[in-house]
Image (spheres, rainbow, N blue to C red):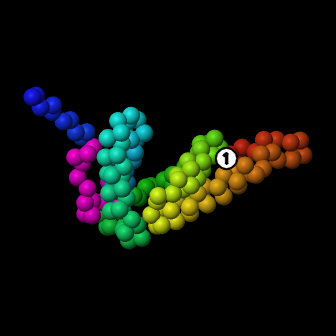
Amino acid sequence: MATIPTQTHPLLAVPLSAATDFTVLAERCETFVSTLIESDDPTLRMALYGRINACLALLEPTLLDPIPTHLIESLTVDVRPTQAPRFSPECTELCSYCLALTQTLSAQGLSAETEKQLSSLLYDLINYFTAEMKAPRWLRTPCGVTLIDEGSV
């Protein structure tokens, strides 16, 4: 009987430890989730979920710690950035996220802590979604009604 060699995805061999800088762990999360979204392989997807979970578990207890001295230079700029990171999904995506979370929560079978966290996320997403749906879109001016630009709000 022939042995079929098992191929392991290179990302599954990337080392993770509590000594890894938070910026590196965050980048690894980003890499894992990017690969996850593009993969149709259920085994790889489960392994990537595990890697993301491991990264986040390493990050969580350090989130409120002071920035390590050796990272300050890499997080310092000479000119204020023109744009800060922000969460701004389209309304259709946001609605889909809320539906997926609601369906996941209603399926039950989650630990009490996971259900609490996902319920809180659903609360935040739905409040954000509602605010987006009810946000003014036009402005009355002396020249008539004009569309409110995202940049001017």
Q: Name the element at disc 1.
A: helix
Q: Is residue 105 visible?
A: yes
Q: Quadrant of residue 35?
A: top left
Residue 114 percent across, percent down from the top left:
46, 62
Q: Nearer the viewer, residue 4 or 123?
A: 4
Taking the spot 60% from the left edge, 50% from the top edge, the residue there is 98
Residue 111 percent across, percent down from the top left:
45, 63
Reading the image, the residue beneath label 1 is 151
Q: Is residue 48 left or right of residue 99?
A: left
Q: Is residue 124 left or right of residue 3?
A: right
Residue 96, placed above or below residue 63:
above
In this view, the residue farthest toward the top is 2
Residue 79 percent across, percent down from the top left:
48, 53
Residue 150, placed above or below residue 40:
below
The N terminus lies in quadrant: top left
Residue 106 percent across, percent down from the top left:
56, 55
Q: Nearer the viewer, residue 16 or 7?
A: 7
Taking the spot 36% from the left edge, 42% from the top edge, the residue there is 45
The boundaries of the magenta stretch are 11-24
